[in-house]
């Protein structure tokens, strides 16, 4: 839910400056994006969006934590400075349900403002692609670890 902002545009821009996704932007570009972002708060257990939704916002956790749940299994946890809603903001239905695991504050960028930022700021586009690549790399690593565990369990059963 959108709430009355407690951070100024400058404070949001300074926060964004800490994040890899925004690291290549100059101060004017950061300020432009920060001015478009809205502050949101979520209570513990609150569902932010459901699997299958095409979420119209990209979120970044300011404080608190959210979990990504797929088939009742927590597959990822996002905390301070971590984005979520990356696929949904591009119009791709999300494969996870996102819910707050503790009181959480986040800033969010709407799909329209996201598309404008990507179009106007090649550095932001590159940062966003890096964020997606890191997420894919993390998931690939987790899959590899799980595959090794399954193979090990199968070997024990065969022994």
Image (cartoon, helix red, strand yellow):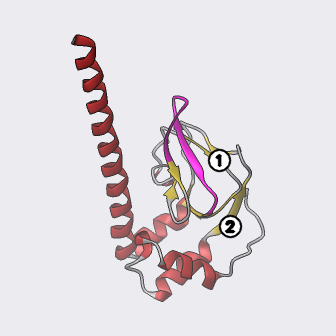
Position of residue 4 relative to residue 54, above or below, is below
The part of the image, by quadrant, that contains residue 50 is: top right
Mark 2 packing: few (<14 Cα in 10 Å), some, or many (20+)? many
Within-10-Å neighbours for mark 1: few <14, some 14–19, many 20+: some
Horizontal and vertical percent for residue 104? 67, 58
Residue sitting at x 30%, y 22%: 153
Does 95 sit left or right of 98 as displayed?
left
Q: Tell me, yes or no, whether the highlighted magenta stretch contains residue 75.
A: yes
Q: Which residues are magenta?
A: 63-76
Q: Residue 60: give x, y in percent of width and height.
A: 55, 63
Under tag 1, what secondary structure?
Answer: loop
Q: Which mark is residue 65?
A: none
Q: Position of residue 16 (x, y in %)?
A: 51, 75
> Quarter-wise, where is residue 38 in the image?
bottom right
Identify the main secondary structure in magenta. strand
Q: Which quadrant, please, contains the N terminus? A: bottom right
Could you say where residue 127 lies in the image, as x and y percent from the top left?
A: 37, 69
Whether residue 76 is situated above or below residue 114 in the rendered picture: above
Q: Which residue is mark 2?
A: 39
Q: Which mark is residue 101?
A: 1
Please name which of the two marks, 2 or 1, marks the residue nearer to the observer.
1
């Amino acid at each position: 839910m959108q709430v009355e902002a407690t951070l100024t545009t400058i404070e949001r821009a300074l926060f964004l400056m800490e994040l890899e996704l925004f690291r290549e932007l100059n101060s004017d570009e950061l300020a432009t994006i920060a001015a478009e972002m809205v502050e949101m708060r979520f209570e513990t257990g609150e569902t932010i969006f459901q699997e299958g939704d095409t979420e119209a916002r990209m979120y970044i956790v300011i404080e608190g934590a959210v979990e990504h749940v797929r088939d009742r299994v927590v597959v990822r946890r996002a905390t301070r400075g971590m984005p979520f809603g990356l696929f949904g903001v591009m119009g791709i239905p999300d494969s996870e349900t996102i819910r707050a695991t503790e009181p959480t504050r986040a800033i969010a960028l709407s799909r329209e403002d996201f598309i404008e930022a990507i179009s106007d700021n090649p550095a932001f586009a590159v940062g966003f692609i890096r964020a997606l690549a890191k997420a894919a790399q993390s998931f690939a690593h987790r899959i590899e670890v799980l595959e090794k565990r399954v193979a090990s369990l199968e070997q024990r059963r065969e022994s």
